[in-house]
Amino acid sequence: MTHLRGGHQLLVDRHTEQAAADAEAAAAAAGVRIVDVHDVDGFEDVRVLFDAVWQPDPGDEPVTRGLLNALVHCGNYCSAAFVGDRMVAASMGFLGLLPEPLLHSHITAVLPDRVGSGVGRAIKLHQRWWALQRGLQVITWTYDPLIRRNAYFNAVKLGALPVEYLVDFYGEMNDAINAGQGSDRLLSRWDLLQPHRSRPSSAPVRELITVVDGIPVLSEDPRSVATEVLAADQRAAPGAGRMRLSITLPADVEALRAADPVTAARWRAVVRHSLGSLMDLGWRVVDVSRDQGYLMESPEPPELTAPAGAGDPVQTQYRQGELS
Protein backbone atom coordinates (compact mmCIF):
# COMPACT_ATOMS: atom_id res chain seq x y z
CA MET A 1 0.00 0.00 0.00
CA THR A 2 2.85 2.39 0.81
CA HIS A 3 4.34 1.73 -2.61
CA LEU A 4 0.99 2.43 -4.32
CA ARG A 5 0.48 5.65 -2.39
CA GLY A 6 4.02 6.71 -3.18
CA GLY A 7 3.53 6.03 -6.88
CA HIS A 8 0.30 7.99 -6.93
CA GLN A 9 1.93 10.92 -5.15
CA LEU A 10 4.74 10.97 -7.71
CA LEU A 11 2.09 11.12 -10.44
CA VAL A 12 0.34 14.01 -8.68
CA ASP A 13 3.65 15.82 -8.21
CA ARG A 14 4.46 15.50 -11.91
CA HIS A 15 1.04 16.81 -12.87
CA THR A 16 1.41 19.71 -10.43
CA GLU A 17 4.78 20.69 -11.88
CA GLN A 18 3.38 20.51 -15.40
CA ALA A 19 0.30 22.49 -14.33
CA ALA A 20 2.53 25.28 -13.01
CA ALA A 21 4.43 25.45 -16.30
CA ASP A 22 1.21 25.32 -18.35
CA ALA A 23 -0.41 28.08 -16.28
CA GLU A 24 2.63 30.33 -16.65
CA ALA A 25 2.82 29.73 -20.40
CA ALA A 26 -0.91 30.37 -20.91
CA ALA A 27 -0.77 33.64 -18.97
CA ALA A 28 2.23 34.78 -21.00
CA ALA A 29 0.49 33.86 -24.28
CA ALA A 30 -2.59 35.85 -23.21
CA GLY A 31 -0.45 38.81 -22.18
CA VAL A 32 -1.69 38.80 -18.58
CA ARG A 33 -0.42 38.33 -15.06
CA ILE A 34 -2.67 36.14 -12.86
CA VAL A 35 -2.55 36.48 -9.09
CA ASP A 36 -4.49 35.17 -6.11
CA VAL A 37 -6.61 37.91 -4.51
CA HIS A 38 -6.34 38.19 -0.72
CA ASP A 39 -7.21 41.75 0.35
CA VAL A 40 -10.43 43.73 0.72
CA ASP A 41 -9.53 46.29 -1.95
CA GLY A 42 -8.85 43.46 -4.39
CA PHE A 43 -12.17 41.80 -3.56
CA GLU A 44 -13.96 45.09 -4.28
CA ASP A 45 -12.23 45.32 -7.67
CA VAL A 46 -13.28 41.74 -8.44
CA ARG A 47 -16.88 42.50 -7.46
CA VAL A 48 -16.93 45.57 -9.71
CA LEU A 49 -15.56 43.57 -12.64
CA PHE A 50 -18.14 40.81 -12.16
CA ASP A 51 -20.94 43.40 -12.13
CA ALA A 52 -19.56 45.14 -15.23
CA VAL A 53 -19.55 41.90 -17.21
CA TRP A 54 -22.75 40.24 -15.94
CA GLN A 55 -24.78 43.48 -15.50
CA PRO A 56 -27.08 42.18 -12.74
CA ASP A 57 -30.16 43.93 -11.42
CA PRO A 58 -29.43 46.10 -8.35
CA GLY A 59 -29.56 43.90 -5.27
CA ASP A 60 -28.95 40.72 -7.27
CA GLU A 61 -25.16 40.91 -7.60
CA PRO A 62 -23.44 37.52 -8.00
CA VAL A 63 -21.04 38.14 -5.09
CA THR A 64 -20.23 40.82 -2.54
CA ARG A 65 -16.89 42.03 -1.25
CA GLY A 66 -17.67 40.58 2.17
CA LEU A 67 -18.57 37.16 0.77
CA LEU A 68 -15.33 37.01 -1.23
CA ASN A 69 -13.38 37.98 1.87
CA ALA A 70 -15.03 35.25 3.96
CA LEU A 71 -14.60 32.57 1.28
CA VAL A 72 -10.91 33.26 0.74
CA HIS A 73 -10.29 33.47 4.48
CA CYS A 74 -11.65 29.90 4.72
CA GLY A 75 -9.27 28.67 2.02
CA ASN A 76 -11.31 29.12 -1.16
CA TYR A 77 -10.27 30.42 -4.58
CA CYS A 78 -10.24 33.96 -5.97
CA SER A 79 -7.93 35.15 -8.73
CA ALA A 80 -7.59 38.10 -11.07
CA ALA A 81 -5.82 38.67 -14.38
CA PHE A 82 -4.06 41.96 -15.05
CA VAL A 83 -2.66 43.76 -18.06
CA GLY A 84 -0.30 46.17 -16.38
CA ASP A 85 -2.32 47.57 -13.47
CA ARG A 86 -5.69 46.99 -15.15
CA MET A 87 -7.80 44.04 -13.99
CA VAL A 88 -9.24 42.41 -17.13
CA ALA A 89 -10.65 39.15 -15.74
CA ALA A 90 -11.43 37.48 -12.43
CA SER A 91 -12.67 34.17 -11.08
CA MET A 92 -13.89 32.72 -7.79
CA GLY A 93 -14.61 29.20 -6.64
CA PHE A 94 -15.13 27.19 -3.50
CA LEU A 95 -14.32 23.75 -2.16
CA GLY A 96 -16.84 20.93 -2.46
CA LEU A 97 -17.12 17.41 -1.07
CA LEU A 98 -19.73 15.64 -3.25
CA PRO A 99 -19.26 13.25 -4.86
CA GLU A 100 -15.54 13.74 -4.09
CA PRO A 101 -13.24 16.52 -2.83
CA LEU A 102 -13.13 19.17 -5.55
CA LEU A 103 -12.87 22.83 -6.47
CA HIS A 104 -16.12 24.22 -7.88
CA SER A 105 -15.46 27.22 -10.13
CA HIS A 106 -18.52 29.37 -9.50
CA ILE A 107 -18.05 32.52 -11.58
CA THR A 108 -15.50 33.82 -14.08
CA ALA A 109 -15.71 37.07 -15.98
CA VAL A 110 -13.58 38.56 -18.76
CA LEU A 111 -13.90 42.15 -19.94
CA PRO A 112 -15.31 42.35 -23.49
CA ASP A 113 -12.14 43.75 -25.03
CA ARG A 114 -10.16 40.71 -23.78
CA VAL A 115 -12.61 37.98 -24.86
CA GLY A 116 -10.85 35.67 -27.30
CA SER A 117 -7.38 36.67 -26.11
CA GLY A 118 -6.74 33.43 -24.24
CA VAL A 119 -7.23 34.88 -20.77
CA GLY A 120 -10.13 32.52 -20.02
CA ARG A 121 -7.94 29.50 -20.72
CA ALA A 122 -5.14 31.02 -18.66
CA ILE A 123 -7.47 31.36 -15.67
CA LYS A 124 -8.65 27.76 -16.02
CA LEU A 125 -5.05 26.52 -16.07
CA HIS A 126 -4.30 28.67 -13.03
CA GLN A 127 -7.26 26.97 -11.28
CA ARG A 128 -5.82 23.57 -12.18
CA TRP A 129 -2.45 24.46 -10.65
CA TRP A 130 -4.14 25.92 -7.54
CA ALA A 131 -6.26 22.79 -7.06
CA LEU A 132 -3.42 20.30 -7.53
CA GLN A 133 -1.27 22.20 -5.03
CA ARG A 134 -4.01 21.57 -2.46
CA GLY A 135 -4.43 17.89 -3.18
CA LEU A 136 -7.59 18.30 -5.29
CA GLN A 137 -7.85 16.32 -8.50
CA VAL A 138 -11.23 17.48 -9.83
CA ILE A 139 -12.65 20.87 -10.83
CA THR A 140 -16.33 21.35 -11.67
CA TRP A 141 -18.29 24.27 -13.05
CA THR A 142 -21.59 24.95 -14.76
CA TYR A 143 -22.20 26.54 -18.16
CA ASP A 144 -25.11 27.23 -20.48
CA PRO A 145 -25.49 24.10 -22.66
CA LEU A 146 -26.55 26.24 -25.65
CA ILE A 147 -23.25 28.13 -25.94
CA ARG A 148 -21.37 25.98 -28.42
CA ARG A 149 -17.98 27.67 -28.14
CA ASN A 150 -17.98 27.08 -24.37
CA ALA A 151 -19.00 23.45 -24.80
CA TYR A 152 -16.16 22.93 -27.29
CA PHE A 153 -13.63 24.78 -25.14
CA ASN A 154 -14.52 22.78 -22.04
CA ALA A 155 -14.49 19.35 -23.69
CA VAL A 156 -11.79 19.67 -26.33
CA LYS A 157 -9.42 22.38 -25.16
CA LEU A 158 -9.52 21.48 -21.46
CA GLY A 159 -10.80 17.91 -21.39
CA ALA A 160 -13.82 18.49 -19.12
CA LEU A 161 -17.00 16.65 -20.11
CA PRO A 162 -20.54 17.45 -18.92
CA VAL A 163 -21.87 14.91 -16.44
CA GLU A 164 -25.27 16.31 -15.39
CA TYR A 165 -28.04 18.41 -16.96
CA LEU A 166 -29.48 20.90 -14.46
CA VAL A 167 -32.89 22.37 -15.38
CA ASP A 168 -33.30 26.05 -14.38
CA PHE A 169 -30.42 25.60 -11.98
CA TYR A 170 -30.32 29.21 -10.78
CA GLY A 171 -34.02 29.95 -11.17
CA GLU A 172 -35.06 33.00 -13.18
CA MET A 173 -32.08 35.25 -13.81
CA ASN A 174 -32.56 38.94 -14.54
CA ASP A 175 -29.08 39.97 -15.64
CA ALA A 176 -28.41 41.36 -19.10
CA ILE A 177 -27.09 38.02 -20.38
CA ASN A 178 -29.65 35.48 -19.12
CA ALA A 179 -32.93 37.35 -18.61
CA GLY A 180 -35.97 35.55 -20.04
CA GLN A 181 -34.04 32.51 -21.28
CA GLY A 182 -34.13 30.15 -18.32
CA SER A 183 -31.03 29.05 -16.44
CA ASP A 184 -30.46 25.47 -17.60
CA ARG A 185 -26.86 24.45 -17.00
CA LEU A 186 -24.53 21.55 -17.66
CA LEU A 187 -22.15 20.51 -14.90
CA SER A 188 -18.66 19.96 -16.29
CA ARG A 189 -16.24 17.65 -14.49
CA TRP A 190 -12.52 18.11 -15.16
CA ASP A 191 -10.37 15.19 -14.05
CA LEU A 192 -7.01 16.91 -13.59
CA LEU A 193 -5.02 13.68 -13.77
CA GLN A 194 -6.97 12.03 -16.59
CA PRO A 195 -8.63 14.71 -18.75
CA HIS A 196 -10.84 13.71 -21.67
CA ARG A 197 -9.08 13.39 -25.03
CA SER A 198 -11.08 13.80 -28.23
CA ARG A 199 -10.71 10.84 -30.56
CA PRO A 200 -11.98 10.77 -34.16
CA SER A 201 -14.54 8.03 -34.75
CA SER A 202 -16.00 6.54 -37.90
CA ALA A 203 -19.00 5.10 -36.03
CA PRO A 204 -22.38 6.12 -37.50
CA VAL A 205 -24.08 9.04 -35.77
CA ARG A 206 -27.82 9.65 -35.68
CA GLU A 207 -28.89 13.31 -35.69
CA LEU A 208 -31.64 14.10 -33.21
CA ILE A 209 -32.19 17.79 -34.04
CA THR A 210 -32.72 19.28 -37.47
CA VAL A 211 -33.04 22.95 -38.34
CA VAL A 212 -35.95 23.91 -40.61
CA ASP A 213 -36.09 27.55 -41.76
CA GLY A 214 -33.91 28.51 -38.82
CA ILE A 215 -36.12 26.70 -36.27
CA PRO A 216 -34.80 23.68 -34.33
CA VAL A 217 -37.01 20.60 -34.63
CA LEU A 218 -36.67 17.21 -32.96
CA SER A 219 -36.43 14.60 -35.70
CA GLU A 220 -37.31 11.85 -33.19
CA ASP A 221 -38.53 11.66 -29.62
CA PRO A 222 -35.41 11.12 -27.49
CA ARG A 223 -37.08 8.78 -25.00
CA SER A 224 -38.42 6.62 -27.82
CA VAL A 225 -34.94 6.49 -29.34
CA ALA A 226 -33.48 5.48 -25.98
CA THR A 227 -36.05 2.69 -25.62
CA GLU A 228 -35.34 1.47 -29.14
CA VAL A 229 -31.58 1.50 -28.58
CA LEU A 230 -31.90 -0.34 -25.26
CA ALA A 231 -33.94 -3.08 -26.91
CA ALA A 232 -31.39 -3.39 -29.73
CA ASP A 233 -28.49 -3.47 -27.26
CA GLN A 234 -30.09 -6.30 -25.31
CA ARG A 235 -30.16 -8.35 -28.50
CA ALA A 236 -26.60 -7.43 -29.50
CA ALA A 237 -23.53 -9.51 -28.80
CA PRO A 238 -21.38 -8.50 -25.82
CA GLY A 239 -18.84 -5.87 -26.79
CA ALA A 240 -20.96 -4.40 -29.57
CA GLY A 241 -20.44 -0.69 -30.08
CA ARG A 242 -22.72 1.81 -28.40
CA MET A 243 -25.21 3.89 -30.38
CA ARG A 244 -24.17 7.51 -30.94
CA LEU A 245 -26.42 10.55 -31.32
CA SER A 246 -25.61 14.15 -32.13
CA ILE A 247 -27.30 17.13 -30.47
CA THR A 248 -27.03 20.17 -32.74
CA LEU A 249 -26.52 23.60 -31.16
CA PRO A 250 -27.06 27.09 -32.58
CA ALA A 251 -23.92 28.71 -33.98
CA ASP A 252 -24.23 31.77 -31.71
CA VAL A 253 -27.11 31.63 -29.25
CA GLU A 254 -26.08 34.89 -27.58
CA ALA A 255 -26.51 36.84 -30.81
CA LEU A 256 -29.74 34.93 -31.49
CA ARG A 257 -31.16 35.95 -28.09
CA ALA A 258 -30.64 39.59 -28.98
CA ALA A 259 -32.08 39.26 -32.50
CA ASP A 260 -34.81 36.62 -32.03
CA PRO A 261 -35.48 35.67 -28.39
CA VAL A 262 -38.46 33.47 -29.35
CA THR A 263 -36.28 31.20 -31.50
CA ALA A 264 -33.58 31.23 -28.82
CA ALA A 265 -36.14 30.05 -26.27
CA ARG A 266 -37.17 27.30 -28.71
CA TRP A 267 -33.56 26.11 -28.77
CA ARG A 268 -33.61 25.97 -24.98
CA ALA A 269 -36.72 23.77 -24.98
CA VAL A 270 -35.48 21.42 -27.70
CA VAL A 271 -32.02 20.93 -26.20
CA ARG A 272 -33.50 20.44 -22.73
CA HIS A 273 -35.88 17.78 -24.05
CA SER A 274 -33.18 15.96 -26.03
CA LEU A 275 -29.87 16.37 -24.21
CA GLY A 276 -31.43 16.61 -20.76
CA SER A 277 -33.74 13.63 -21.24
CA LEU A 278 -30.99 11.40 -22.60
CA MET A 279 -28.58 12.27 -19.81
CA ASP A 280 -31.31 11.42 -17.31
CA LEU A 281 -31.53 8.00 -18.98
CA GLY A 282 -27.81 7.35 -18.62
CA TRP A 283 -26.55 8.54 -22.00
CA ARG A 284 -23.16 10.26 -21.83
CA VAL A 285 -21.67 13.18 -23.70
CA VAL A 286 -18.46 11.74 -25.11
CA ASP A 287 -17.29 14.65 -27.28
CA VAL A 288 -18.21 18.06 -28.67
CA SER A 289 -17.93 19.18 -32.29
CA ARG A 290 -16.85 22.74 -33.03
CA ASP A 291 -19.26 22.88 -35.98
CA GLN A 292 -22.28 21.02 -34.62
CA GLY A 293 -22.63 20.28 -30.91
CA TYR A 294 -22.72 17.34 -28.52
CA LEU A 295 -21.92 13.74 -29.39
CA MET A 296 -23.74 11.30 -27.09
CA GLU A 297 -23.28 7.60 -26.49
CA SER A 298 -25.83 5.12 -25.19
CA PRO A 299 -25.27 3.41 -21.83
CA GLU A 300 -24.39 -0.23 -21.53
CA PRO A 301 -27.50 -2.43 -21.32
CA PRO A 302 -28.29 -3.75 -17.83
CA GLU A 303 -26.84 -7.22 -18.34
CA LEU A 304 -23.53 -5.74 -19.49
CA THR A 305 -23.23 -3.20 -16.68
CA ALA A 306 -20.48 -3.95 -14.15
CA PRO A 307 -21.72 -5.15 -10.74
CA ALA A 308 -22.04 -2.74 -7.83
CA GLY A 309 -18.65 -1.77 -6.47
CA ALA A 310 -16.81 -2.44 -9.74
CA GLY A 311 -15.26 0.12 -12.02
CA ASP A 312 -14.89 3.81 -11.34
CA PRO A 313 -16.95 4.74 -8.25
CA VAL A 314 -17.11 8.38 -9.28
CA GLN A 315 -18.62 7.61 -12.68
CA THR A 316 -21.00 5.11 -11.05
CA GLN A 317 -22.27 7.82 -8.73
CA TYR A 318 -22.91 10.15 -11.63
CA ARG A 319 -24.80 7.46 -13.57
CA GLN A 320 -26.99 6.71 -10.59
CA GLY A 321 -27.93 10.36 -10.19
CA GLU A 322 -26.43 10.68 -6.71
CA LEU A 323 -24.85 14.03 -7.48
CA SER A 324 -26.89 17.03 -6.39
Image (tube, rainbow, N blue to C red):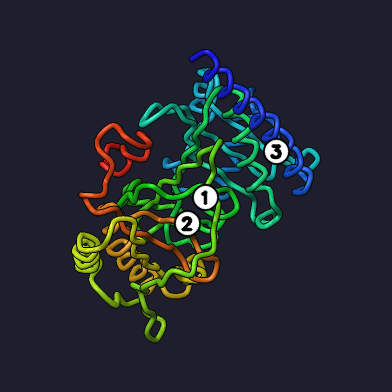
Q: Is residue 136 left or right of residue 42?
A: left
Mark 2 or mark 1: whose residue is earlier in sequence: 1
Q: Is residue 239 left or right of residue 232?
A: right
Tell me, yes or no, whether the two marked residues, 2 and 1, touch with CB atoms within 8 Å: yes
Classify mark 3: helix, strand or loop.
Answer: helix
Which of label 2 and label 3 is nearer to you? 3
Can residue 180 be seen in this snapshot?
no
Above or below 216: residue 168: above
Please name the residue shown 69% across and 53% down the image: 114
Mark 3 or mark 1: whose residue is earlier in sequence: 3
* Residue at image mark 3: 23
- Residue 108 x %, y %: 56, 43
- Residue 223 x %, y %: 21, 64
Please name the residue shown 34% across and 64% down the image: 243
Q: Residues within 10 Å of mark 2 (few under 14, many from 20)?
A: few
Query: Front-most of 209 and 117?
Result: 209
| Most distant residue in the top direction | 2
- Inspect the image, locate mark 3, and give the three-letter code of the amino acid beneath it: Ala
Distance Cα–Cα, label 2 vs label 1: 7 Å
Please name the residue shown 44% across and 56% down the image: 286
Q: Is residue 79 left or right of residue 26?
A: left
Above or below 1: residue 303: below
Dot label at residue 176? 2
Q: Residues within 10 Å of mark 3 (few under 14, many from 20)?
A: many
* Residue at image mark 1: 54
Query: Front-most of 89 and 53?
Result: 89
Can residue 287 be seen in this snapshot?
yes
